[in-house]
Amino acid sequence: MNRQLLHEEYEHKYKKHNLTVVLDNLEHMENIGSAFRLGDAFCVSKIIILDDKQVFLASNAKKNYKKIDKTARNCMNYVDYKIMSTAQFLELSKAEKLNLLALEITTDSQLIEQVYFNNYDNLTLIIGNEKSGVQEMLLNKIVASVHIAMFGNNSSLNVANALAIALYKISNDLKN
């Protein structure tokens, strides 16, 4: 008889990838929480939250953390993270020689399935804001942009859904 496995019965092969995910000023805490859950599921080594509006320093920071953790289901404890401004991130990316890739439709973007992510050292995937996408200041610093093929009338997906598809492809490339 086929049955669903219990969590402790599932064989985990947990090995963190040299992969950082950058959340570019996301506004919905549930998307940030989902990013942590996905980051854990796909062995992301670090998440960087760009917070130019200082959402996490504001008076409602405690409430925002609760919203994130509710969606993340404790995965904030398993994925390292930093909160910083875009300017601080650009300094960090230069100092650490990060290869910045954007998940964004641009004039030069490639279909995600045509990119082999194992070709990039210090791979850093930037996910854009829910309304405005990846900010131009970051797009000017990327080595490449990738996008997910869409077959309907819409040209974009929810941030967390797009991140899930991208991390699935990237983690499959990095495990080989």
Image: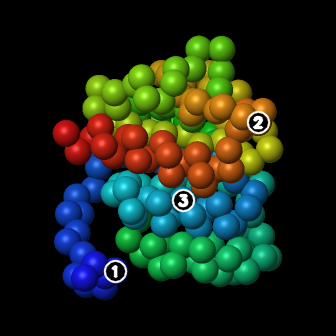
Distance CA(mark 2)–CA(mark 1) = 35 Å
- Which numbered disc flags the more N-terminal residue, 2 or 1? 1
Name the kind of residue labelled 1 in the image: Gln
Residue 23 located left or right of residue 99: right
Q: Residues within 10 Å of mark 1 (few under 14, many from 20)?
A: few
Q: Amino acid at mark 2?
A: Asn
The image quadrant where one finds the C terminus is: top left
Point out the image quarter for the N terminus.
bottom left
- Residue at mark 2 to residue at mark 3: CA–CA distance: 22 Å
Mark 1, residue position: 4
**Residue 130 visible (yes or no):** yes
The vertical placement of 12 against 138, above or below, is below
Q: In the rendered structure, which amino acid carries the disc numbered 3?
A: Ala
Between disc 2 and disc 3, the foreground one is: 2
State the residue position of label 3.
Answer: 35
Q: Residue at x 68, y 50 (%)?
A: 158
**Residue 80 left/right relative to 140:** left
